[in-house]
Amino acid sequence: MDAFYVGDCLRALNLNPTLAVIEKVGGKTKKKEKMLKVDDFLPIFAQVKKDKDAGSFEDFMEVLKLYDKTENGTMLYAELEHILLSLGERLEKSELEPVLKDCCDEEDEDGFIPYEPFLKRVLAFKI
């Protein structure tokens, strides 16, 4: 397998490695730089699987609850957009727009969205 696809393979196996983790374990940013055999990939998978820094659904829910001012399972759409654009591995607005379009419910009249369905859709999404 081309090492360019290490991140895709790990995500297909229900892991959530960051770009930094993928680079650290040998993933490449250009195709045809390095090829891996199954015997090379299995230790990478094991290492990323035991990584405690990778967030789970429950971890992400706890973070989003911090923005739930009324404690009713909703948060401001604009706040979610800001978080995703500015924290962690930053996204460009052009990268974020299709994710929000595909994964967010419609905003209510006050600009709030339910965050649990959003999170479930994002985590279920496979490249």
Image (spheres, rainbow, N blue to C red):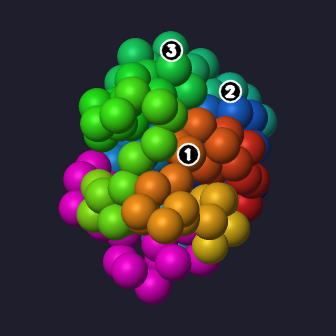
Q: Position of residue 31 (x, y in %)?
A: 59, 74
Position of the N terminus by quadrant? bottom right
Q: Position of residue 76 (x, y in %)?
A: 37, 55
- Name the residue at the front extreme: 109
Residue at screen point 22% across, 61% down: 86
In this picture, which residue range is highlighted in magenta? 84-100
Query: Residue 97 lies in magenta, yes or no?
Result: yes
Residue at screen point 56% across, 27% down: 57
Query: Residue 62 lies in magenta, yes or no?
Result: no
Residue identified by numbered label 3: 50
* First of labels 3, 2 by sequence position: 2
Q: Position of residue 25 (x, y in %)?
A: 44, 39
95 or 58, nearer to the observer: 58
Q: Nearer the viewer, mark 3 or mark 2?
A: 3
User: Magenta region's main secondary structure?
Assistant: helix
Query: The residue under label 3 is which amino acid type?
Result: Lys
Query: The residue under label 1 is which amino acid type?
Result: Pro
Residue identified by numbered label 1: 114
| Secondary structure at numbered mark 1 | strand
* First of labels 2, 1 by sequence position: 2
Residues at discs 1 and 3 in contact (Cβ within 8 Å): no
* First of labels 1, 3 by sequence position: 3
Q: Which quadrant of the structure image shows residue 105?
A: bottom right
Position of the C terminus by quadrant? bottom right
Q: Is residue 48 visible?
A: no
Residue identified by numbered label 2: 42
Q: Which quadrant of the structure image shows residue 32?
A: bottom right
Give the CA distance from mark 2 to mark 1: 38 Å
